[in-house]
Image (cartoon, grey):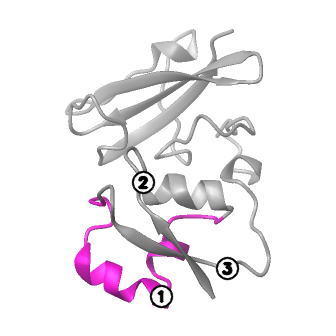
């Protein structure tokens, strides 16, 4: 059994999966109920407002990615709902403060802030394509830091 969901502006399959408790976007995109959607949108990075996907029912909820331990060198994302990163598995290199992260040649910095409780959190990614919108990949790395 699945539930229909209409894509809204700013949605990505990763964001939707995170909000719904799935380990990653493939659990939704690859679900048999989304066969028609996959034919319509063979590139999962190109979804549009108004598209309808089916959200599968989960029998056992999975943890938010921030609650899943990463490799020892990775600093986990705080358990917040505002800073979803495209590459939490690959932290961007930085010098001093994490907001001074660097991107490799051919990638550009994208950063924004969000609020979790009373704290401001900075979120950043190195993307291949310059854009005023979020979630335009491919991405090289991601990083987060406390602003306040």
Q: Is residue 124 left or right of residue 49?
A: right
The quadrant holding residue 45 is: bottom left
In magenta stretch: residue 46:
yes
The x, y position of residue 85, in whole percent, is: 51, 41
Task: Name the residue carrying label 3.
Answer: 57
* Marking on residue 33: 1
- The crowd level at tag 3 (other Cα within 10 Å; few <14, some 14-19, many 20+) is few
Sequence order check: which comes first, mark 1 or mark 3? 1
Determine the residue positioned at 39% across, 70% down.
52
Q: In the figure, 108 relative to 79: above or below? A: above
Which image quarter holds the C terminus? Answer: top right
In magenta stretch: residue 100:
no
The quadrant holding residue 125 is: top left
Determine the residue positioned at 26% across, 59% down.
46
| Magenta span of residues | 22-47
Determine the residue positioned at 67% across, 37% down.
77
Which image quarter holds the N terminus? Answer: bottom right
Say what secondary structure mark 1 lies in.
helix
State the CA–CA distance, disc 1 to disc 3.
11 Å
The x, y position of residue 137, in whole percent, is: 30, 46
* Marking on residue 12: 2
Q: Residues at badges 2 and 1 in contact (C-beta under 8 Å)?
A: no
Q: In the figure, 139 relative to 44: above or below? A: above
Q: In the figure, 110 relative to 9: above or below? A: above
Determine the residue positioned at 31% across, 37% down.
127
Residue closest to the eye, 9 or 12: 9
């Amino acid at each position: 059994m699945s539930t229909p969901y209409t894509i809204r502006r700013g949605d990505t399959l990763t964001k939707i999966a995170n909000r719904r408790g799935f380990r990653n976007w493939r659990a939704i995109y690859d679900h048999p109920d989304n066969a028609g959607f996959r034919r319509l949108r063979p590139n999962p990075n190109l979804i549009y407002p108004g598209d309808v996907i089916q959200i599968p029912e989960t029998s056992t909820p999975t943890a938010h990615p921030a609650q899943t331990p990463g490799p020892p060198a990775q600093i986990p994302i705080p358990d917040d709902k505002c800073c979803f990163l495209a590459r939490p598995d690959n932290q961007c290199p930085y010098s001093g403060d994490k907001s001074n992260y660097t991107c490799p040649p051919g990638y550009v910095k994208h950063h924004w802030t969000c609020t979790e409780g009373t704290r401001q959190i900075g979120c950043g990614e190195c993307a291949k394509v310059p854009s005023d919108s979020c979630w335009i990949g491919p991405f090289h790395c991601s990083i987060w830091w406390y602003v306040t």
